Image: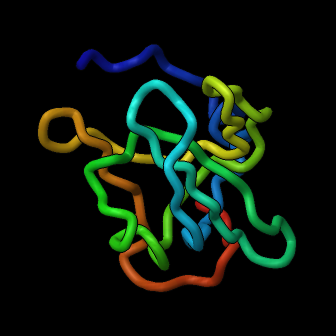
């Protein structure tokens, strides 16, 4: 994959990326196999919904997992679902999403810097 063009630091600085904990996993009402994740970002932000094709994880393996997500994008419609945050990941085997997570437990809602 080629590197993207040089970006000004302000583009990164505009993103609000926080740590949350997945507290609920449901089948999303979309055409593609998708999970509807409810993620707790702590008292300041509260819980938000993220929808994505992260089906390489069984539901049970996701509950309690800390993840990083962009919390200041506008909500995005995904079929009948609305995703309020963008949960970050990288491609794994066969393109399956691997979540970006802290290496150890951290306080909910802390920002990435």
**On the rendered image, what quadrant is the C terminus found in?**
bottom right
* 32 and 38: which is toward the camera: 32
**Residue 46: x, y in percent?**
81, 68
* 55 and 76: which is toward the camera: 55
Determine whether 21 is above or below 77 in the image. Answer: below
Residue 42 is drawn in which quadrant? Answer: bottom right
**Residue 86: x, y in percent?**
60, 43
**Residue 54: x, y in percent?**
37, 46
**On the rendered image, what quadrant is the N terminus found in?**
top left
Q: Residue at x 48, y 40 (%)?
A: 52
* Relative horizontal placement of residue 57, taking residue 78 as reference (left or right): left
Determine whether 6 is above or below 107 in the image. Answer: above
Q: Residue at x 33, y 20 (%)?
A: 3
Q: Residue at x 63, y 64 (%)?
A: 39
Q: How many circles with numbers are drawn on the protein?
A: 0
* Relative horizontal placement of residue 44, taking residue 106 as reference (left or right): right
Residue 113 visible (yes or no): no
Residue 97 visible (yes or no): yes
Residue 13 is drawn in which quadrant? Answer: top right
* Relative horizontal placement of residue 48, taking residue 24 as reference (left or right): right
What scheme was used to colour the molecule? Answer: rainbow
**Residue 14: x, y in percent?**
74, 39
């Amino acid at each position: 994959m080629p590197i993207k063009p040089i970006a000004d630091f302000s583009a990164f600085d505009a993103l609000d990326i926080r740590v949350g904990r997945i507290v609920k996993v449901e089948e999303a009402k979309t055409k593609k196999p998708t999970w509807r994740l409810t993620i707790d970002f702590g008292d300041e932000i509260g819980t938000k919904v993220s929808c994505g094709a992260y089906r390489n994880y069984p539901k049970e393996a996701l509950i309690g997992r800390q993840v990083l997500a962009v919390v200041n994008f506008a909500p995005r419609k995904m079929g009948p679902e609305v995703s309020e945050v963008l949960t970050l990941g990288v491609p794994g085997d066969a393109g399956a999403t691997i979540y970006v997570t802290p290496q150890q437990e951290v306080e909910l809602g802390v920002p990435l810097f």
